[in-house]
Image (spheres, helix red, strand yellow):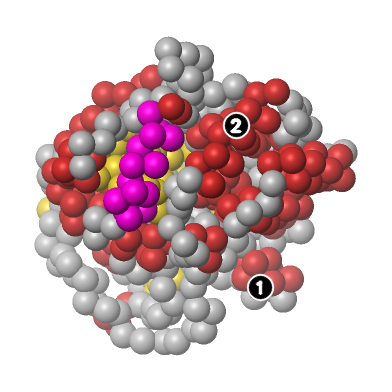
Amino acid sequence: MKKKIVSMLLASAMVISLMACGNGSSDSETGNADSAETEADVPETETLDIYVPDVPEIEGSDAEAEIDIWTYYGGDNTAMADFAVEQIKKKFPNVTINLEAYPQDGGQTVKTRAAAGDLPDLLLVDSGTLMTLAKSGNIIPIDDYADEFNIGNYYTDAIMENCLVSEDGHVYQFPIGSISPILWYYNSQLFEDNNIKVPENYEELLEAVKQFRQLDITPMSMFGKEPWPLGAFFDSFAMKNNEAGFYALSTGEAKASDEGYAEAVEKIKELIDEGIFQEGSTNADFDTASALFKSGKAAMILDGSWYTSEAIAELGENLDIMEIYPTGEPGDTANQYAMSGGGDTNGMAVSDSAEDKDLAAEIGFLFTYYREVAHYETTGLVETPLKVEGLELDTELDHVSAKLQEVLPNYTFSGKFLHTLTNTEFSTTFTEEMQKFIVGESSEDFISNIDKCIERTVE
């Protein structure tokens, strides 16, 4: 059944942390957050006036309880989280839900609080933290709950097949986020005004970088303080020769000194030397890099498809995306649709410390589902994890999303996000080496150090 949502969640129903939730990543990822926790009234957010289907598998109850949830909160995420809680309250009117903003610091706070036995009833996990928490017993398998709630009725086959089951064969999370490509966004007006061709291959990319530098325009804005954009940029080149990119390096299936990887490294080095990134890019966070791009001071930026709505609000029709990475040789179509990004076992897990695990699981599923409903219906998210039959878009697709919708079926995803690798020592070293590479490390040293890392970290 469908219901029209017109009311806002009462402020007394929630306790919200004031920690900021970073943007600039698949809802799963990054940014930096202040670790201080402060209780405050619910901030006012825009009413979401959208249609929502019921979830008949969960009947609800009048029992009194309290559930703590660690989730994305801040910016656009605020309205989606508030909306999800509002729907939950219709089934569980006497359950108090306390939302705390998830600190996006690569999982460090999660692991610290897990070690201290201080996890909430429900918390976000991804492959970078999931198995660590599962092996330590901090989160529980939810296979039976996933079956009981028939979550396959709500999520796409791609999510059920690629983003649900972990490496040990168990399900630990109700999915948030979907299979998202990392895109090269560009300001079409900057290219047009300066008579610079939008690159389709490496030769054209190199020429565009040189031309923008001559005009004192940053060719590509980079938030290199975070791991995953550095990994995605590397993969934009490496995947032309090996679809698995740095993921194959992390597993020992390839080496940086292999011909295809060495070729990718030399291309990246040439672009760095020509000034593709802004000064201080290795210390830049998402907000800094995004502001540079949205203000017209940078021609391109690398980010996930989730960035479209934010960027288009500022650039409008001047925002566009490159359908493939312009990093291959002219005329070479090998792996042209191999994309960085993809899916992850990202979602809401049930803590072992939850007093009522059955209730926590019910709330966890409802929260993730309704959050994704709000995300899809208000933004027209092309790569939604949900089956969209019965859902209704609140807006028409923008021109960038429409373009992505057409090309998305061609994309293949064989890699990982850098920060979600199970070989965490490799991901840490790779991040450090990419940062050193950007500020002047030689290609030879970069390749040598990565190969040494592979030998050291791959069993």
Residue 220 percent coordinates (x, y): 39, 48
In the image, taking residue 293 as reference, residue 173 lies left or right, namely: right
Residue 1 in sight here: no
Name the quadrant of the N terminus: top left
CA gap between label 1 and label 2 equals 39 Å
Q: Which residue is mark 2?
A: 264
Question: Label for residue 388?
Answer: none
For residue 41, say whether it is visible.
yes
Image-based side of 37 in relation to 207, left or right? right
User: Which SS type dominates the magenta stretch?
Assistant: helix
Q: Please report the residue visible at 29 percent of the width from the left and 57 percent of the height from the top.
A: 297
Q: Residue at x 68, y 51 (%)?
A: 441
Describe residue 110's horizontal placement relative to residue 348 as left or right.
right
- Residue range highlighted in magenta: 204-218
| Residue 288 in the image: above or below residue 329 | below
The residue shown at (45%, 28%) is 202
